[in-house]
Amino acid sequence: MMAFKSFARTGSLIASIAVAQPALAQELVDLEVCRLSVSADNAIDWRGLYGRGYEVFEPAENYEVVAVQVRHEGPACNFFLSAAPLGGSGSPALEGPQEQLLYDLRRMPDGPSILSPDYFGSEFSRIDGQFGPGAQSQTYQLYLAVPSSQLVGGGTYTGQAVLRVFRDDSDGPALADEAGVAISVPVESVLNVELADAAPGVRTMDVDLGSLSRSMERSVLFEIRSNASVRARIASQNRGTLTHFAGAPGIPYRMMVGEVPVDLSSSNAEIDVTPAKTQQSALPMTIAVDGAEIAAAGQYSDLVTITFIAD
């Protein structure tokens, strides 16, 4: 009975040693693995050239800096860094209220892009690197660009890019770590209106109708740029009548803005003049007068105020 107990204790000791050996072996194996991790600015709020977001009519391209760090422990190894838009396919785009805004993540302000729909990236998009043995890190400065000339509506556009770091050894690439970068780009609703036949910034114009004894028609051209819905509010001081300087009976006239007749008898007539999705749209305002052969001689005039409103 005593011998059995002694044997059990001895057996227990031998079993304990046998179990410890694989754990030690596993620990030694882990020390031979290159360990990589990646971190980045986890939220980028786009400020743009003037600090107010993306400028739809600004021709110059701008960018925001994204700081990325790859850390290493263990033996020497090769690695590469790649990135993909969230979703992993198609063009990288941020989602807005009704539209998409394209973006890019680049090695330099003018490229190349490191974004790729391929999980491992491509030979053109990857950033390759290597570490020696021991604890080390490498820092990269990437550039978040939003290409110019995207005529999108006002609102906030959001999305996410995913950065991935891979070990690159003889067995092929293996994902080591990944980090997300949330992107937010505000876009303002913008409206710019100019008189085509006047100097920039001029807001008033005298329209000479010539002799009113015969029928005539004159046009004034507005140049409109906007990424929003636009209304024109038209107010005639004399409710659609050219009044005589000395009080003689006036002469009525008609107006069209674009292809829409304007009811000048209303104090504030409104019409939709939303421009096409182009950089600039021409909007004619046409004034027509029927001949008034028996009208009193003298000067006739009216004052029309047009207010353009972006919604």
Image (cartoon, grey):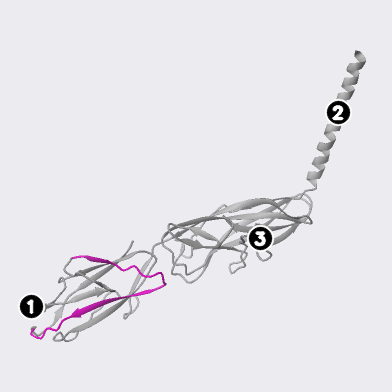
* Region rendered in magenta: 267-294
Give the mark, 2 or 1, whose residue is nearer the N terminus.
Answer: 2
Q: Which mark is residue 124?
A: none
SS label for mark 2: helix
Residue receiving disc 3: 121
SS label for mark 3: loop
Of circles 2 and 1, which is in front? Answer: 2
Q: x%, y% of residue 220?
A: 28, 79
In-image side of 232 versus 151 (left or right): left
Give the amino acid type for the residue marked by disc 2 in the picture.
Answer: Ala
SS label for mark 1: loop
Tell me what residue is drawn at x 61 percent, y 66 percent: 108
Determine crowd level at label 3: few under 14, some 14-19, many 20+ residues with C-alpha closer than 10 A: some
Give the amino acid type for the residue marked by disc 3 in the picture.
Answer: Gly
Determine crowd level at label 1: few under 14, some 14-19, many 20+ residues with C-alpha closer than 10 A: some
From the viewer's side, name the closer residue of 195 and 2.
2
Tell me what residue is drawn at x 31 percent, y 69 percent: 273
Of circles 3 and 1, which is in front? Answer: 3
Q: x%, y% of residue 271?
A: 27, 67
Q: Which mark is residue 249?
A: 1
From the viewer's side, name the closer residue of 46 and 104.
104
Give the amino acid type for the residue marked by disc 1 in the picture.
Answer: Pro
